Amino acid sequence: MVSKLDFVSIPSQDAARSRAFYVDLLGLRPDDQAQFEVWAGDTCLTIWEPERMGMEFSPQKHGHLALHVDDVAARRQELEAGGVEFSGEILDTGVCHMTFFTDPDGNDLMLHSRYSPRA
């Protein structure tokens, strides 16, 4: 039986560039024991280069990691000032705000904030 999620893999063509994006721009916590692991709360993101293992690189698409922020609009503005390009406007689903972007390798990400309690 599965008891938890151990980590999420983030494919990259340049792990150092990706680490800088996730740590320096997004503000995720770097792991003090692994150079290419970063933390979003209790979830570890492991940056890896598939091509170094003889595999073809392909970004993760349509499985957006929903990165929680308290204020989607404010954080989007900060990231846009840092050069991040978003696709479309901020969506309001009636229970949450979300907005979509990619990392430097084209992996799909989203900023997310739930403002209505679960029913």
Image: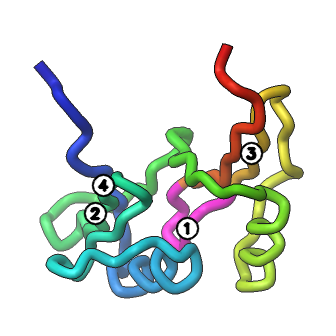
Asked whether 5 falls inside the magenta stretch, the response is no
Which amino acid type is marked by label 2? Thr
Estimate how packed mark 1 is, as few (under 14), some (14 to 19) or many (20 or more) residues with alpha carbons within 10 Å: some
Q: Which of the two discs, 4 and 2, labels the residue nearer the N terminus?
A: 4
Instruction: Name the residue beneath numbered marker 3.
Output: 98
Find the magenta span and give its range. 101-107
The mark closer to the camera, 1 or 3, is: 3
Distance, label 4 to label 2, CA atoms, is: 5 Å
User: In front here: 105 or 81?
Assistant: 81
Labelled pair 1, 3 in contact (Cβ < 8 Å): no
Of the image marks 2 and 1, the number of the one nearer the N terminus = 2
Left or right, residue 78 beside residue 63? right
Between the C-alphas of marks 1 and 3, the distance is 16 Å
Residue 104 covered by magenta stretch = yes
Q: Amino acid at mark 1?
A: Asp
Cα distance in 3D space between marks 1 and 4: 13 Å
Q: Secondary structure at mark 1?
A: loop
Q: Which residue is mark 2?
A: 46
| Residue on which the image places disc 1 | 103
- What residue is disc 4 on? 9
